[in-house]
């Protein structure tokens, strides 16, 4: 009867055990290599061949990185990547894909050769949205297997390129929740 006069419960602050990389949320802060990044978005990819990739957009000033987590056989694999212009790949890769429905077996970006590894079809969910966007992805790896390049095709002629490398969870520290 007197519920109207009760104070609204504040949203509970995250518990210490929630301040881990896999539980990042927009607004959180995280440190890597002495730089503090703000988590500006959290997205999800679901793959036709099975599996899910969680993605967090990390920003510091104009610098934007994408932290990705894939769980494989109970083990989490982390990677960090940045978007590039498709023009950074030598040759007209977009036209090649449009004409052949696949990229070449190897591509060159910033002087490094990357070899085709695998492809998949995915569904992308921005934030908490249930609206899915479909795309095709091709993954490439450098000769040393330490860096990778990903080409994503969204629709007929829109392409995104990311260049990334594996990272470990311990490389990210000082995780702090953002404003409530």
Image (spheres, rainbow, N blue to C red):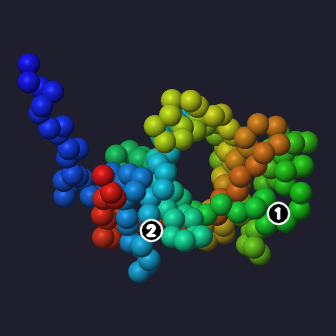
Cα distance in 3D space between marks 2 and 1:
27 Å
Residue sitting at x 66%, y 69%: 143
- The foreground one among 13 and 21 is 13
Residue 86 placement: quadrant:
bottom right
Query: Circles 2 and 1: CB distance less than 8 Å?
Result: no
**Left or right: residue 11 compared with residue 151:** left
**Left or right: residue 70 compared with residue 101:** left
Rendered position, 133 above or below 143? above
Mark 1 Cα-neighbour bin, 10 Å: few <14, some 14–19, many ≥20: few
- The foreground one among 61 and 112 is 61
Element type where label 2 sits in the image: strand
> From this viewpoint, which residue is outermost toward the bottom?
34
**Residue linked to disc 1:** 87
Residue sitting at x 23%, y 52%: 14
The label shown at residue 37 is 2
> From this viewpoint, which residue is outermost toward the top?
1
Counting from the top left corner in percent of width and height, residue 9 is at: 17, 39
Counting from the top left corner in percent of width and height, residue 146 is at: 57, 69
């Amino acid at each position: 009867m007197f519920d109207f006069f009760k104070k609204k419960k504040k949203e509970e602050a995250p518990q210490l055990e929630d301040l881990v990389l896999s539980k990042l949320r927009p607004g959180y802060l995280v440190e890597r290599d002495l730089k503090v990044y703000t988590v500006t978005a959290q997205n999800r990819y679901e793959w036709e061949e099975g599996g899910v990739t969680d993605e967090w957009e990390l920003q510091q000033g104009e610098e934007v990185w994408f932290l990705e987590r894939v769980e494989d056989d109970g083990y989490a694999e982390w990677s960090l990547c940045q978007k590039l212009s498709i023009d950074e790949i030598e040759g007209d890769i977009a036209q090649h894909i449009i004409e052949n429905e696949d990229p070449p077996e190897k591509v060159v970006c910033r002087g490094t050769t990357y070899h085709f590894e695998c492809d998949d079809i995915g569904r992308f969910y921005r934030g908490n949205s249930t609206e899915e966007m479909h795309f095709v992805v091709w993954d490439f790896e450098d000769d040393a297997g330490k860096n990778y390049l990903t080409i994503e095709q969204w629709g007929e002629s829109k392409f995104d390129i990311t260049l990334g490398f594996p990272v470990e969870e311990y490389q990210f520290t000082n995780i702090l929740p953002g404003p409530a």
